[in-house]
Image (spheres, rainbow, N blue to C red):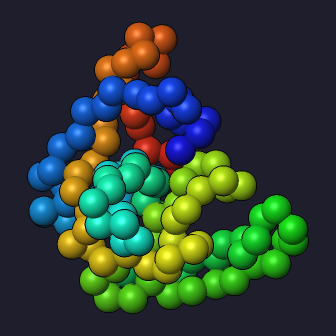
Amino acid sequence: MLPTLNISGNLLLAERISTRTGKLRPGDVVILRSPESPRKIVCKRLIGMEGDQVTYVVDPMNSDRCQTVVVPKGHVWVEGDNIYASKDSRNFGAVPYGLLKGRVFWTVLPRKDFGSLAPKPK
């Protein structure tokens, strides 16, 4: 999630109500169980909800080739903010909504980043 979050780690506050009530929106930063390694919890930005069309760069290191997908029912599309070094929906596809654990809303540490973690506009 560079540059939004530090490489050395951040202490974040997350709430679980939004994921349970369906109040998430594209641009929110979410925590979820990794679809590739279920024991890991990862932090990604929500890009698309079910039914949304998402266009993404397939291999940003080597080409500008884009692909468009429609997010299936019951799934979301998540991406890391660091397009060049992120394992996200571009690698493993749409993520089942049930893997979402919470929405990050506040950065506690480091102190210089203390404050609200507002959604990134489209």
Q: Residue at x 71, y 55 (%)?
A: 84
Residue 1 point in image, percent of width and height? 53, 44
Residue 110 point in image, percent of width and height? 43, 16
The total number of labels drawn is 0
Can I make out residue 23 in this image? no
Camera-side residue of 11 and 66: 11
Q: Among all residues in the image, which is located at the extreme right? A: 63
Q: Among all residues in the image, which is located at the extreme top? A: 111
Taking the image as shown, residue 34 lies to the left or right of residue 22, namely right
Residue 66 point in image, percent of width and height? 75, 78
Residue 70 point in image, percent of width and height? 50, 87
Q: Quadrant of residue 9?
A: top left
Q: Residue at x 37, y 71 (%)?
A: 35
Q: Residue at x 46, y 54 (%)?
A: 45
Relative vertical location of residue 109 with respect to residue 8 in this rendering, above or below: above
Q: Residue at x 31, y 31 (%)?
A: 12
Camera-side residue of 37 and 77: 37
Taking the image as shown, residue 34 lies to the left or right of residue 79, namely left
Relative vertical location of residue 29 with respect to residue 22 in this rendering, above or below: above
Relative vertical location of residue 54 with respect to residue 26 in this rendering, above or below: below
Can I make out residue 120 in this image? yes
Q: Quadrant of the C terminus?
A: bottom right
Taking the image as shown, residue 72 lies to the left or right of residue 33, namely right
